[in-house]
Image: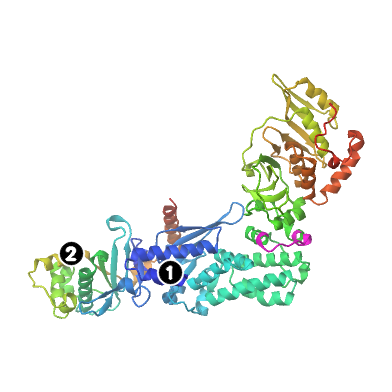
Amino acid sequence: MSLNDEIRAALDLDNPEDTVRRLKRAIANELRILNVNARVIDTHYFNHTFTPDFVVRWNGGGRQREERPVYLRFESERDYYPEDLEILGEQNPILLGLEVSPEDHRYPNEIDSAAVEKDAMVISSNAVEHLARERTTEPFARLVSSSIGEAGRGAIDEQRAEEATQAAVSTFAAARQVNAAELSSRLDTLTGVLSESKAHQLSSFLEAVWVGSGGVSTEFPRSLSMSGRLTTDQWQFLLEFENVEDDSFWRGLGAGLNLEQLGHLSVHGFSPNLQALVAANWDRLSPRVARVLPDQARLDAPDVPRHYWSISSGSLCLRGPESTVYVAVDQQALTVDADKKDGPTVAQLLQRQRRTAFDVVEVLFVGSKRTLDFSAEEGALTPEEITEKGGIMGREGRVKKASIRLPDDRKLALDFTTSTAGGQQAMHPLKELVIATEGFLVDASEEDLAEVVSLLPDVQQQMLTRLQAMAPRLELRSPLELESGDEPPV
Amino acid sequence: VWLDSTTRVSAEWINPEGPAARKLGFEWANGNPFSFDLGGVMLGGDWHHEHFFAEVKNQVAGDGTDYRDFVAKAMRALLSQSARCDHFIYISWAPFLVSTWGSLCTWEFVQETALDKKYSARVFGDDVPKKDDLNLVKQCQDLAEKLWLIILSDKQVDFLRPDRKHVDMIRLRILEEAES
């Protein structure tokens, strides 16, 4: 049943309360489709002069809360809209006109200019239905629909909504094809239905896509100097868009990417675009902490790799066959609880060290009767020193904590009992944090570790170079060539 | 706007010519349609969520013809759909029938109007009750208790129009309630 039919059916009900209930339910559903991230709050008022019917509230990025009041009106009363807007003032309202007729009526210029002046949006129910329907079809139109829900401005009838969504599709295609003429001719139609800040944001996004697709920033129509970061919605759109394998596209877009924003994205299962995004931008992500949790064996499709990036519990995570590594900007942002474990044995610690080739600089041993905190006076602890000190703890001895030195000379704390790497202070490059976590906190095989390394391009080369430099001291071949089960000399 | 500004009613249905027709319209006994200017619900107090119909007259005949028409409509509405008829509000910008002002919301005035030849057939159809019909008296008393008579002035309407600060305060309060 179309929204228009719903409105007519509701008005045909005898009891006014039933009518209001059905009307508002139908409109609330459309508002939820239009802006899936928003909460639609019903005030239980209807068609009141200055009390909204709904308040639509959403997270505006970070912890900022944004909202818009929605006032239902009847399109037959459109002559009174300018007066309504005058009373409602500067609260950025949406005046949603219930249209009984399936035919769309154009809004006169007076209503458009009154709405623009008040930073308000007047929109017909036919236009709302069009935008909500577009959400389920064209990917970029979906992004534009929710942008209109959040920051639409002016009078938007169904025809104008259609023009805007068509312009959305063609401007995005033009940005991907670096077609300045096409982009220039349609951009105003798209941005004309949005507030200035949202129009700027959307143009910045198209410019980012333009640059990501090989275009030159200064040749982008009405160059905006790309000051703004992409919004969560825009990243979400790109992740769900058709697969783009071009690394430079993702690199070009990722200038403002951060872990907090990634954590707000919704990803189900394996997303090829997320793999490409992280692979091209991992050096821009600076986590402080990583935590491993064991997983049930996964039932992924056969073509899904054993390790891949995903987003879960508000964090970027690396899914493995039996465990998941969650990375976060700090402890507070890490929402997964630790799974308490005993630490590894001394032999296991040394084996893990050989695989990663990171220096161990401090170890906290725990035995049945005592603990021993042992750190290198300078440089790193040698395997012999670790073996000797660990031996004091006897057969029951376990490694509870350790510190390792990363290539940038910073120390990384490892807590084996909570399977957590890092802490509150220093940020670490994603690649080293993940390799250290997989290498020390998970008993990953060489094969798994090699696959993780391959997810972070050029890390492999750096690792090999580093390992080759260390090989004489550790008397090792390339650790990636080690056979499973190799034990260090004890 | 003025009714909504009182914050004690929500005039949800306005303009009987538009989509609100079904909510504001009734039929006389002879089948002809009539309607009130607007309707809605009362907010708060003992009458919370009770329904009202209102007639708004900017220019009124000094002999009270418009008001009598309104009382006759209210009587017919009450007889045909009593469930939605909790309050009938007459809003005027000028007084009328001033010599009998005190009696305009009494059951006797209602009875006199309903039995007036001008209205009786439309209100009751063929079976117009006698003046001493106890049921009629009861119906007239019932309607008299539901009548409101309000005289407005432009200054009052303009002054009561909420400014932005009031609108924001009321909106926030209502939103708090809606979320709780």
Which residue extends farthest top? A369
Chain letter for mark 2: B
Label count reads 2
B18 horizontally vs A230: left or right: left
- The stretch of residues the image draws in magenta is A239-250
The answer to whether A434 appears left or right of B99 in the picture is: right
Relative to residue A387, is residue B57 depicted above or below?
below
Name the residue that disc number 2 marks: B142
**In front of the other: A135 or A269:** A269
The answer to whether residue A40 is above or below residue A308 is: below
- Say which residue appears at 64% left-offset and 74% top-offset: A188
**Which of labels 2 and 1 is toward the front?**
1
| CA neighbours of label 2 inside 10 A, class few (<14), some (14 to 19), many (20+) | some
The answer for how far apart the CA atoms under marks 2 and 1 are is 37 Å
**Circle 1 is placed at which residue position?**
A6
- Please state the chain letter of the residue tagged with numbered disc 1 in the rendered image: A
Q: What amino acid is at disc 2?
A: Asp
Q: Secondary structure at mark 1?
A: helix
- From where the camera sits, is residue A50 visible? no
Residue A97, image x and y in percent?
Answer: 46, 71
* Residue projecting furthest to the front: A302
Q: Quadrant of residue B141?
A: bottom left
The residue drawn where x is 64% and y is 54% is A267
Looking at the rendered structure, the secondary structure element under dot 2 is: helix
Q: Amino acid at mark 1?
A: Glu
Percent position (x, y) of residue A364?
74, 27
Q: Tell me if mark 1 has few (under 14), some (14-19) or many (20+) residues whose alpha carbon lies within 10 angstroms of its own.
A: some
